Amino acid sequence: MTKTISSNGAFPTTRLRRPRLNDWSRRMMRENQLTHDALIWPLFVREGDGAPEPVGTLPGVSRHSIDSLVDQARYAADLGIPAIAIFPRINPEDKDEDGTLSGNSNNLVCRSVEAVRAAVPNIGIVTDVALDPFTTSGHDGVIRNNQVDNDETVAMLQQQALVQADAGATIIAPSDMMDGRIAAIRSALDAKGHQDVLIMSYAAKYASAFYGPFRDAVGAGKTASVVGKETYQMDPANSDEALREIALDIDEGADFVMVKPGMPYLDIIQRASSSFPVPVFAYQVSGEYAMIEAAAASGGIDRTKAMLESLMAFRRAGARGILTYYAAEVAEILNA
């Protein structure tokens, strides 16, 4: 590289440190911004009343009663967070092999959505469409002949999406990774008069080790030994395949697409955001959150700085929005 020498012989004339010297100039030249408008807050809901139940593997995260969930939704709206995402912990006695409760309009998710919609009418409500919280196996679909049956599962997902939309969900978020489910769900929603309900597809969801604390939170940690989730979730070694998955879901009617997990797949977020004219979202999953918390608890990192830096990485990679358990805390900091 050729050195740039000034007219008086001093080196160098180009000093990239100059704009970094002051806070005001650093803020002016900042290429990406983290705002509360980019945040979606995942919340866990359970049956019954009483105080929130801490999730042992997710410090600072709890399972809420419906009343407590409504309080959290109000808090999110007050902070300027545009949407919450609801994930249920279904009582074991209400589960079965096929997850049939998922399509029942009186299930925990639907009652939660109805309560939040009535109390906080202007907040976005994202609902997960997959069978794993409802199945005894913990799989995202029904098992037939020792494998997850794609087409039978898709039919159940259509019904699950419909009851959630009927309850007042504004964003249906299929996380199951079945083939063809976006087109099927879009068709079912439109036929029922829910043409304005958005679909956020978990388009590139990897078979990841980073989901463990989430499965603990929703009680879906036990999976059938005869078939693994790698038969429908993506191989962590693949990136071109992710673009094929995303392209298919967009063609089938997805309004937004999701990459999950987030931090280990920043390259996928960047490729997707550069390749498609559709908003790309990232999920900072439970394992990512738990790692930051563990490192901070040991004194190894500055928790607040690491939290904010990790979210900025998603924005820098091109994520329009971020699902993160830090949403409320970050919104408080941004609003200060």
Image (cartoon, rainbow, N blue to C red):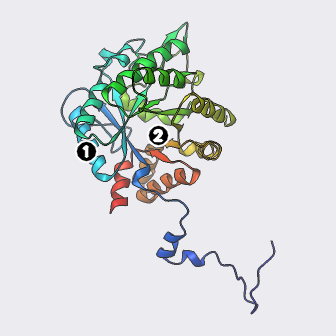
- The residue closer to the viewer here, 184 or 325, is 184
Residue 225 appears in the picture as rendered: yes
Please, what is the three-letter code of the amino acid marked with disc 1? Arg
Q: Position of residue 313 (x, y in %)?
A: 54, 53
Outermost residue toward the right in this view:
2
Quadrant in which the C terminus is drawn: bottom left
**Residue at the spot x=26%, y=47% of the render?**
75
How many badges with numbers are in the image? 2
Outermost residue toward the bottom in this view:
8
Q: Position of residue 224 (x, y in %)?
A: 49, 16
Quarter location, residue 67:
top left
Q: CA distance from mark 2 to mark 1?
A: 23 Å
Above or below: residue 294 compared with residue 106: below
Residue 149 appears in the picture as rendered: no
Outermost residue toward the left in this view:
50
191 vs 267, left or right, is left
Above or below: residue 42 compared with residue 96: below
Q: Residues within 10 Å of mark 2 (few under 14, many from 20)?
A: many
Marks 2, 1: nearer the viewer: 1
Above or below: residue 118 compared with residue 97: below
The numbered disc on residue 74 is 1
Q: Position of residue 173 (x, y in %)?
A: 45, 31
Quadrant in which the N terminus is drawn: bottom right
Q: Earlier in the sequence, mark 2 or mark 1?
A: 1
- The residue closer to the viewer here, 90 or 27, is 27
Please, what is the three-letter code of the amino acid marked with disc 2? Val
The numbered disc on residue 285 is 2
**Residue at the spot x=46%, y=57% of the render?**
34
- The residue closer to the viewer here, 277 or 99, is 277
**Residue at the spot x=53%, y=50% of the render?**
314
Q: Position of residue 11 (x, y in %)?
A: 72, 84
- The residue closer to the viewer here, 130 or 280, is 280
